[in-house]
Amino acid sequence: MEAEQRRDNRSSSNGERAPSNIVLEYLPMVTKVVVGILHSIYAFINLAFLCIYPVEKSLKDKVVLVTGAGRGLGREMSYLLAKEGAKVVCVDINAEGVKETADVINRGRTGADAGADFYTTNVAEPSQVNELAKAVEEKWGKVDVLINNAGIVASAPLMDTTDEQIKRMIDVNLVSHFWMLRAFLPAMKKRNEGHIVATSSVAAFTCAANIVPYAATKYGVTGLMASLREELRANPSNNIKTTTVHPFFLDSAPINVKHWEVKSTLPIVSIPQVARAAIQGIKREDVIVTVPEILRLIMHVLWIVPQKSADYWRDAFSSKINKA
């Protein structure tokens, strides 16, 4: 026994580890890998089951705040939320547009019978956002679902974009999310319930010319939401959900606003199509919603293949975006 122990000690003094020590060292990691594989298999099976038999939460009587509700996707989501029975708080810098959205939902109803309210707010200004939070809390008591949808869409070569245009896009598309979260998240944490939704873009999964500031903001929103979810998960009893919506390029013709000229081998998506997918994702508590869904897989594949191959596929199928 003593001789064997001396041999083990000699192995240690020579810098060599005994086989038993190596096994013990790697056993926890191997165990985690095996459990991870089994967990992944279970997750795939569970996902397939939920695709066939989805579980959706009700939005009836929930207070849902939508930024950028004055037109486009924000307006369409507000309409669909009202049909779900939600109380919709419409927010936009466009006073006329946001009032029109609320008026269409209310259809003459006022007071307690009204299904929507509206606020004219510049979400890029933290002082205005804090005032909004106070006003909403006083009237509605709480916000169950916060949809950060406000955004600026524009295209141009980077060197043709002015300093003010870059700053404005970053402030509205990205920084405003911080102000909204800091204003509304504390109350959700106090109740330990709520749902935070952000409109990002498929541009956050890939790259394209002539939308450098826009794509940068969408990458930022995606990273913000992913990291926020991790912060929330640090609380074992967390019940605050997050959903990030990644639509392909929207057909803006119905709202008579042409942000850019898109030439794509893939069909662009309609505003109602994205709005329906977003509301469905909220009801199902999906972490990520991509419209169309297949694009998420395609974009992830491009991250794996060699760069020359990725460039080929982008040249073959990517969208060409030019200034409108």
Image (tube, helix red, strand yellow):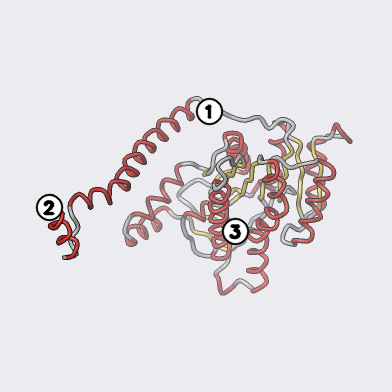
Mark 2 highlights which residue? Answer: 4
Indicate the quadrant containing the C terminus: top left, top right, bottom left or bottom right. bottom right
Q: Give, as a three-letter code, the residue at label 2.
A: Glu
Mark 3 highlights which residue? Answer: 260
Which percent across, then down, holds residue 269?
A: 56, 44
Which percent across, then down, holds residue 78?
A: 71, 40
Rendered residue at 41%/50% (across/down): 300
Q: Give, as a three-letter code, the residue at label 1.
A: Pro
Which mark is drawn over residue 276?
Answer: none
Question: Can you say whether 106 is above or below 245 in the image?
Answer: above
Tell us which disc is closer to us: 1 or 3: 1
Question: Can you say whether 133 is above or below 84 in the image?
Answer: below
Mark 1 highlights which residue? Answer: 54
Which percent across, then down, holds residue 87?
A: 76, 36
Identify which residue, 53 or 191, lies in the foreground.
191
Which mark sits nearer the N-terminus, 3 or 2?
A: 2
Identify which residue, 257 or 186, lies in the foreground.
186
